[in-house]
C-alpha cells in the first residue's frame, strides 16, 4: 500500500521542499520535489500545508480530563488520543510523584494501553519523581518526596523496562549513582525539580545526566551561599554543552525574551519542546480540575491555582508549541519542527526509526496548515486523523 502526501511544504531538519512524501506500508519510501510522478494507491492533497515528521512529546501528564496517574486504561487512551489529534505521533506518558502502589499500577496499565488502536506510539514511561528537592517540589506531593535508594529504583527498573526516562534532583544523596545506573540501561536521565548548584550539575553531567526537565521551572538559579554567589541549575543549562533542555513553549511558562535567549544559546539541536500538559489540555476555559490535591482553573490558556498565585500546569497541545516558537520566539519553521521531532527523538534514543522524514524510517507524519491546525496524522503508515 503506497500513500502520497502531495502539494505541500515538506519540512526536513535543514530546509523546506515544495513537493510531498510517499509512504509504503509502515515506512517512508520517498521525498519528492514538485508534482507527483509515481504510481500510488492513495493520494492526499494537503493544499499547501506543511508536511512534517510526527511530533514527539517527551513530557505529558495527560489531557481531555484524564491524567496518567489515574492509572486506568481509559485515562491512558483518552489522554493520548487527544494529543494524537493535535499531531503527536509518539509520546512518553509521564507519571508524577505518587504512592508506590499507584505508580506500579500506572506502569502496568501502560503496557495494556500501548496495544490499543488509534493511538500515538509510546516510547517509554517518564517518571517525574519522587527523588526531588523539597525546596523545588512545585505541584509534586511532598508526602512522597525522598532521596533515591538503589534498593528501591533498581527493582522497579528491572520489573518495568519500559521506564525510559527518569527526572531526578541531582544534588540528592544517591542521585549520581542512580544516573550511572540509568545511563547503563539506556534510560534518559534528566535533572529536574532541583536545587543544584553548578558544581552539582557538572558532577551530574559526568554521571550520565543529559537533559534538564522543564528548563527554568522547578530549578534554582544563581544565589548567595555564605556571601558568595553560586550559579544554579539554570545557568548550568547554558554553560554545560552536554546538557539538552526541554521547554514548555505554551506562551505562558516562559516569556518571549527567555524563549529567544534559550534558542540563541542552545540551538535547535539541544532543545526539546514539550507540552508538560495536565488533564486540562483540550478542555475549555473555566474548567476546574485537580493535580494531586491542588485544584486549578483553566484561564487565559493556562492552568492556574484557584487563588491565581501560580501556574498549575500547561494545557497546551503540541501544534501550539510550534506556533509559539515561530510567532513569539521568531524561530525558523525548520528549527521549530526539529525541536519537536528530531531533537526529542535523539534524546530518547529513537532517532534511528523516527524524528525526520527519511526513507526507511517509520511513516509517522503530521500535516498542519499556516494557522497550525492539524489536518492529517499518520502513525506507522496508518492514517489515524484525516
Image (tube, rainbow, N blue to C red):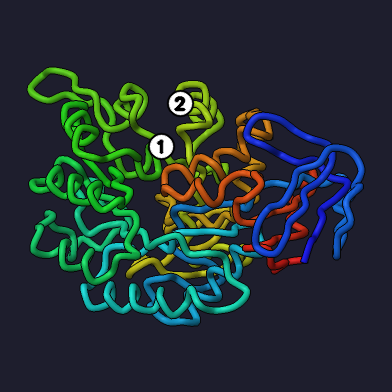
Name the foreground residue: 6 vs 361. Answer: 361
Q: Which mark is residue 40?
A: none
Q: Residue at x 46, y 50 (%)?
A: 350
Q: Compared with residue 216, is residue 169 higher up or lower down, i.e. above or below? A: below
Q: Residues within 10 Å of mark 1 (few under 14, many from 20)?
A: many
Q: Residue at x 14, y 42 (%)?
A: 176
Name the foreground residue: 257 vs 158. Answer: 158
Q: Which mark is residue 245?
A: 1
In the figure, is residue 247 to the left or right of 171?
right
- For label 2, the SS is helix
Q: Which mark is residue 266?
A: 2
Name the foreground residue: 126 vs 342. Answer: 342
- Picture quarter containing residue 160? bottom left
Q: How many marks?
A: 2
Q: Quadrant of the N terminus?
A: bottom right
- Picture quarter containing residue 234? top left
Q: Residues within 10 Å of mark 2 (few under 14, many from 20)?
A: some
Q: Residue at x 32, y 62 (%)?
A: 163
How far across and down, in percent of the image, does residue 231 sit? 24, 24
- For label 1, the SS is strand
User: Can residue 356 be seen by looking at this rendering?
Assistant: yes
In the figure, is residue 171 to the left or right of 26?
left
Q: Compared with residue 301, is residue 97 higher up or lower down, i.e. above or below? A: below
How far across and down, in percent of the image, does residue 129 sit? 26, 57
Q: Distance from label 1 to label 2 (Cα)? A: 8 Å
In the figure, is residue 242 to the left or right of 117?
left
User: Can residue 300 be seen by looking at this rendering?
Assistant: no
Amino acid at each position: 500500500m503506497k500513500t502520497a502526501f502531495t502539494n505541500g511544504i515538506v519540512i526536513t531538519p535543514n530546509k523546506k521542499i515544495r513537493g510531498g512524501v510517499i509512504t509504503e506500508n509502515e515506512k517512508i519510501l520517498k521525498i519528492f520535489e514538485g508534482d507527483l510522478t509515481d504510481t500510488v494507491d492513495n493520494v492526499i492533497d494537503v493544499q499547501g500545508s506543511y508536511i512534517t515528521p510526527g511530533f514527539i512529546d517527551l513530557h505529558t501528564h495527560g489531557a481531555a480530563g484524564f491524567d496518567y496517574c489515574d492509572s486506568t486504561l481509559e485515562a491512558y487512551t483518552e489522554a493520548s488520543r487527544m494529543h494524537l489529534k493535535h499531531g503527536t505521533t509518539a509520546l512518553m506518558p509521564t507519571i508524577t510523584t505518587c504512592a508506590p502502589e499507584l505508580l506500579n499500577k500506572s506502569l502496568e496499565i501502560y503496557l495494556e494501553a500501548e496495544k490499543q488502536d488509534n493511538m500515538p506510539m509510546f516510547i517509554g514511561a517518564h517518571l517525574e519523581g519522587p527523588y526531588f528537592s523539597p525546596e523545588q517540589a512545585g505541584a509534586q506531593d511532598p508526602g512522597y518526596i525522598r532521596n533515591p535508594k538503589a534498593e528501591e529504583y533498581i527493582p522497579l527498573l528491572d520489573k518495568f523496562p519500559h521506564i525510559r526516562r527518569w527526572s531526578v534532583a541531582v544534588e540528592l544523596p544517591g542521585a549520581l549513582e542512580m544516573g550511572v545506573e540509568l545511563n547503563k540501561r539506556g534510560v534518559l536521565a534528566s535533572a529536574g525539580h532541583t536545587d543544584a548548584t553548578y558544581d552539582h550539575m557538572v558532577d551530574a553531567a559526568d554521571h550520565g545526566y543529559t537533559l534538564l526537565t522543564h528548563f527554568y521551572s522547578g530549578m534554582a538559579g544563581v544565589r548567595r551561599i555564605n556571601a558568595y554567589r553560586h550559579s544554579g541549575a539554570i545557568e548550568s543549562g547554558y554553560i554545560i554543552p552536554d546538557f539538552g533542555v526541554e521547554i514548555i513553549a505554551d506562551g505562558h511558562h516562559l516569556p518571549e525574551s527567555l524563549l529567544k535567549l534559550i534558542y540563541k544559546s542552545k540551538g535547535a539541536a539541544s532543545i526539546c519542546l514539550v507540552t508538560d500538559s495536565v488533564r486540562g489540555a483540550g478542555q475549555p476555559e473555566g474548567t476546574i480540575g485537580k493535580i494531586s490535591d491542588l485544584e486549578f482553573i483553566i484561564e487565559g490558556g493556562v492552568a492556574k491555582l484557584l487563588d491565581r498565585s501560580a501556574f498549575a500546569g500547561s494545557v497546551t497541545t503540541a501544534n501550539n508549541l510550534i506556533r509559539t516558537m515561530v510567532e513569539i520566539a521568531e524561530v525558523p519553521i525548520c528549527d521549530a519542527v526539529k525541536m519537536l521531532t528530531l531533537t526529542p527523538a535523539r534524546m530518547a534514543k529513537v532517532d534511528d526509526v523516527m524524528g525526520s522524514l527519511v526513507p526507511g524510517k517509520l511513516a509517522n507524519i503530521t500535516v498542519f496548515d499556516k494557522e497550525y491546525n492539524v489536518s492529517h496524522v499518520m502513525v506507522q503508515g496508518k492514517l489515524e486523523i484525516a
